Image (cartoon, helix red, strand yellow):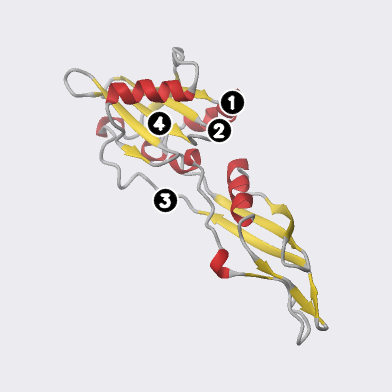
Amino acid sequence: MPPPPPGDRAPSLDLTSRVQPIYPGFDVIYAIGGTTVLDTVISDTGDIVDIRIERSSGHLELDHSAIEAVRQWRFAPGNKQGHRVGGVVRIPIHFNPTSLKSGNMLWPADYAHPHYIADETPIQFETVDATLDAVASEAHSPITGTPKIKQFQIRDAQGGIIQWWIFTDLDTPDAMATRLVFRGTLDHPVVAVSSLCARAEVCSARKMLTLHGPDLASSP
């Protein structure tokens, strides 16, 4: 935006009010990033009137997260010839995923870059919450966990990992349970993938990403 004339100023952000956007859980696990550019319409009282997506990140979840964060920010109105005025503040929100590959030593080394296939055996539970309760009971505790992301290992009697469960976007409409079943041989490692979502369209939209594997062990 061009600078205003001397003595005038455009609406501005109160930096102390800046709330960082929440990185959606699925996007973290699968290393999805991008930049959302928002045009935020400010009134002459400093209130947010509207938030428009000037340029999408290419991922709906990231765009929504950016909007929800900016809604919580506070702005000061502009000034023109001694009068308070509104205006538009353009805000880029960057989502830069941090790779999980280097820091996760729990994934089986023999399956560092397996071949992923769709599992024909569906997850037997009706909801993501019911699945989470059952898996947590069997695995006893998550190997990693945040309020919106939990991961579990299921092992056989010899201690080998036979399943890896990933729960993302918990307590949101995009909640998702993904089961990774370890199959194949040392020469041809295979991981069978199945998912259950709170909304069926979420699983459909993410199917190709899940078949590429999580960032810590993506397909070759």
Q: Quadrant of residue 216?
A: top left
Separation of marks 2 and 3 at Cα, in angstroms: 21 Å
For the residues carrying marks 4 and 2, which lies nearer the camera in this image? 2
| In the depicted structure, whether residue 144 falls above or below residue 18 | above
Give the mark nearest the N terminus, 1 or 4.
4
User: Where residue 73 sits in the image (x, y, percent)?
Assistant: 61, 61
Q: On the image, numbered disc 2 is attached to which residue? A: 174
Amino acid at dot 3: Thr
The C terminus - image quarter = top left
Amino acid at dot 4: Ile
The N terminus - image quarter = bottom right
Q: On the image, numbered disc 1 is attached to which residue? A: 199
Classed neighbour count for the residue bearing mark 2: other residues with Cα under 10 Å, few (<14), some (14–19), many (≥20): some
Separation of marks 4 and 3 at Cα, in angstroms: 17 Å
User: Where residue 156 sits in the image (x, y, percent)?
Assistant: 22, 19
The residue positioned 68% from the left and 56% from the top of the image is 38
Amino acid at dot 2: Asp
| In the depicted structure, whether residue 153 falls above or below residue 183 | below
Give the mark nearest the N terminus, 1 or 2.
2
Q: Find out whether the residues at labels 4 and 2 contact each other: C-beta distance under 8 Å.
A: no
Q: On the image, numbered disc 4 is attached to which residue? A: 166
Residue 211 in sight here = no
* 114 left or right, relative to 96: left
Q: Find out whether the residues at labels 1 and 2 contact each other: C-beta distance under 8 Å.
A: yes
User: Where residue 42 sits in the image (x, y, percent)?
Assistant: 74, 63
Which label number is shown at residue 120?
none
Which label number is shown at residue 98?
3
Q: SS for tag 2?
A: loop
